[in-house]
Image (cartoon, helix red, strand yellow):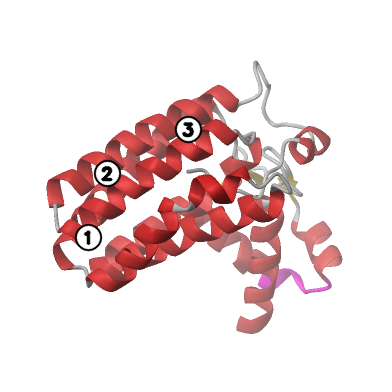
């Protein structure tokens, strides 16, 4: 049963993050069970986990829906993200082993050339992979499983929000410079600069993200509009 519950959870979570199940989608156990080829019990358990994740919420006692996305809750998410990531960067600067960050430092210096390649998508994917490896290096350096777990929860919601964000080459270059400053600070063991550079980066990231949201878009969005604006890039 645990395995079936995990299968249902992973499938539904993926559908929510990819907007196959968009904000406001009603989640009916019977229909989901039929679609997933599972009994209702593991589906019910999966839905309970998604409620705990904040991806699903009760609909006035009449079932469950996928939680909405709005400029307001993007801002709220970034408020939490800033607190967690600034602390993580500070701890990484204090506790890090330098070698992984020296390697990242060299790679971030090469980002302008990487993004200049207009066969573009491979270059962009390589950049996003680099950002993911930066996050993983920070997670490893902080040596705090509770902080890493909290960051994982935030990243789950960021993965969904990025589906509303349009790619901006100028912003990618700016973000790469901001990441390099954070990495430089971590390499130098400069706790204050690592935290401050992270705050500046996230303030600019929030401004860019809010600016890229579809103007006056009512939520929930239709699946077609969500798919059209979908991007695989992390929100950085």
The residue that label 3 is drawn on is 73
Secondary structure beneath label 3:
helix
The residue that label 1 is drawn on is 187
Q: Residues within 10 Å of mark 1 (few under 14, many from 20)?
A: many
Q: Tell me which residue sits at (29%, 45%) in the image.
A: 181
- Numbered range of the magenta stretch: 37-42
For marks 1 and 3 on the same chain, the one whose residue lies earlier in the sequence: 3
Dots 2 and 3: beta carbons under 8 Å? no
Which mark lies nearer to you, 1 or 3? 1
For marks 1 and 2 on the same chain, the one whose residue lies earlier in the sequence: 2
Name the residue nearer the viewer: 30 or 118: 118
For marks 2 and 3 on the same chain, the one whose residue lies earlier in the sequence: 3
Q: Which mark is on residue 127?
A: none
CA gap between label 1 and label 2 equals 21 Å
Secondary structure beneath label 1:
helix
Tell me if residue 32 comes above or below residue 215 in the rendering: below
CA gap between label 2 and label 3 equals 16 Å
Secondary structure beneath label 2:
helix
24 sits left or right of 128 in the view: right
Dots 1 and 2: beta carbons under 8 Å? no
The residue that label 2 is drawn on is 83
219 sits left or right of 132 in the view: right
* Residue 217 colored in magenta in the image: no
Q: Residues within 10 Å of mark 2 (few under 14, many from 20)?
A: few
Name the residue nearer the viewer: 132 or 71: 132
Question: Is residue 217 visible in the rendered structure shown here?
Answer: yes
Q: Residue 18's x, y, as percent?
A: 70, 51
């Amino acid at each position: 049963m645990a395995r079936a519950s995990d299968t249902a959870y992973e499938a539904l979570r993926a559908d929510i993050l990819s907007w196959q199940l968009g904000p406001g989608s009603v989640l009916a156990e019977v229909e989901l069970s039929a679609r997933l080829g599972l009994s209702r019990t593991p589906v019910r358990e999966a839905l309970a986990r998604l409620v705990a994740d904040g991806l699903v919420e009760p609909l006035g006692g009449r079932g469950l829906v996928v939680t909405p996305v709005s400029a307001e809750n993007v801002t709220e998410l970034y408020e939490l993200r800033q607190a967690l990531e600034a602390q993580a960067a500070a701890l990484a600067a204090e506790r890090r082993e330098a070698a992984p960050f020296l390697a990242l430092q060299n790679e971030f210096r090469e980002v302008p050339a990487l993004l200049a390649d207009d066969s573009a998508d491979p270059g962009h994917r390589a950049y996003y992979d680099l950002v993911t490896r930066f996050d993983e290096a920070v997670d490893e350096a902080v040596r705090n499983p509770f902080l890493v777990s909290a960051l994982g929860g935030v990243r789950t919601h960021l993965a969904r929000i990025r589906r509303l964000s349009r790619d901006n080459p100028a912003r990618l270059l700016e973000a790469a410079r901001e990441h390099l400053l954070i990495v430089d600070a971590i390499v130098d063991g400069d706790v204050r600069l690592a935290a401050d550079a992270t705050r500046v980066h996230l303030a600019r990231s929030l401004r860019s993200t809010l600016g890229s949201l579809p103007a006056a878009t009512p939520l929930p969005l239709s699946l077609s509009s969500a798919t059209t604006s979908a991007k695989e890039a992390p929100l950085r």
